[in-house]
């Protein structure tokens, strides 16, 4: 008499179990990626092409001989053919002029080297990485050019003109010795 009950071999059962675990982990990682993408204000079409600190997506540095400046964004995204710079400022919850100037420099050098003007850059602020888009406008580029010109004139020996404020000077460690203190 032939036994009509056939059991599934152990190897096949283990293979099915391993495949199930792989699919489960893949789904978790995909959901996490989508959550991070939505939280960062990114489109589904965004592709991460460079990330500082990553071995798989090495950071990219942009250098302009004509300007004598370089920049290295924390990350680069490719979106609709444009390269979007991303900077993370983990210790700051407010967008400051210095953050915007650095982002504008990233965009200027990307445009010069890659030949495609980034429509915006993304600042991720604070530990929660609140996303702020910095638009790449002609007005902001003129502001960047003015700041670069001012920096060059200071480097060439023209004295820097301080612009102290009571709020900043009040907490400064050298305010008692500073000739320009507003306190």
Image (spheres, rainbow, N blue to C red):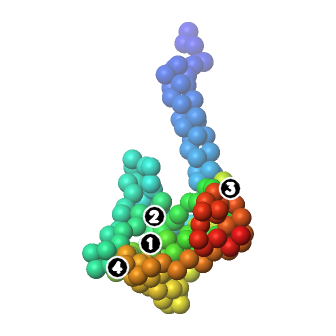
Please say if the residues under marks 1 and 2 sit with CB atoms less than 8 Å apart: yes
Where is residue 94 shown, x and y percent of the image? Answer: 68, 67
- The residue carrying pointer 1 sits among few (fewer than 14), some (14 to 19) or many (20 or more) residues within 10 Å by Cα, namely many
Is 23 in front, or is 94? 94
Q: Which residue is mark 1?
A: 106
Q: Which residue is mark 2?
A: 73
Where is residue 154 shown, x and y percent of the image? Answer: 41, 78
Label 1 to label 3, Cα distance in Å?
23 Å
| Among the two numbered marks 4 and 3 on one chain, the one whose residue lies closer to the N terminus | 3
Please say if the residues under marks 4 and 3 sit with CB atoms less than 8 Å apart: no
Which mark is nearer the camera, 1 or 4? Answer: 4
User: Considering the numbered disc 3 on the image, is that residue within a helix, a strand or a loop?
Assistant: loop
Label 4 to label 3, Cα distance in Å?
41 Å
Q: Which residue is mark 3?
A: 128
Residue at 58% in and 36% down:
20
| Among the two numbered marks 1 and 3 on one chain, the one whose residue lies closer to the N terminus | 1
- The residue carrying pointer 2 sits among few (fewer than 14), some (14 to 19) or many (20 or more) residues within 10 Å by Cα, namely many
| Among the two numbered marks 1 and 2 on one chain, the one whose residue lies closer to the N terminus | 2
Drawn side of residue 110 relative to residue 3, left or right: left
Q: Which residue is mark 4?
A: 156
Label 1 to label 4, Cα distance in Å?
24 Å
| Among the two numbered marks 2 and 3 on one chain, the one whose residue lies closer to the N terminus | 2
Residue 120 appears in the picture as rendered: no
User: Considering the numbered disc 2 on the image, is that residue within a helix, a strand or a loop?
Assistant: loop
| Among the two numbered marks 4 and 2 on one chain, the one whose residue lies closer to the N terminus | 2
Q: Quadrant of the N terminus?
A: top right
Label 1 to label 2, Cα distance in Å?
7 Å
């Amino acid at each position: 008499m032939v036994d009509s009950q056939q059991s599934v071999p152990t190897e096949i059962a283990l293979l099915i179990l391993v495949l199930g675990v792989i699919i489960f982990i893949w789904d978790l990682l995909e959901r996490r990626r989508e959550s991070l993408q939505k939280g960062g204000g990114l489109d589904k079409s965004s592709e991460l092409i460079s990330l500082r600190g990553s071995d798989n997506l090495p950071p990219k540095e942009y250098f302009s001989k004509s300007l004598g400046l370089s920049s290295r964004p924390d990350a680069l995204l490719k979106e609709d053919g444009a390269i979007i710079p991303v900077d993370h400022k983990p210790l700051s919850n407010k967008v400051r002029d210095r953050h915007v100037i650095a982002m504008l420099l990233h965009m200027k050098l990307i445009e010069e080297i890659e030949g495609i003007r980034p429509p915006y850059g993304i600042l991720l602020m604070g530990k929660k990485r609140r996303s702020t888009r910095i638009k790449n406008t002609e007005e902001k580029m003129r502001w960047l050019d003015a700041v670069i010109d001012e920096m060059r004139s200071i480097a060439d020996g023209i004295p820097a003109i301080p612009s102290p404020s009571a709020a900043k000077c009040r907490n400064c460690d050298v305010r008692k010795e500073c000739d320009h203190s507003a306190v």
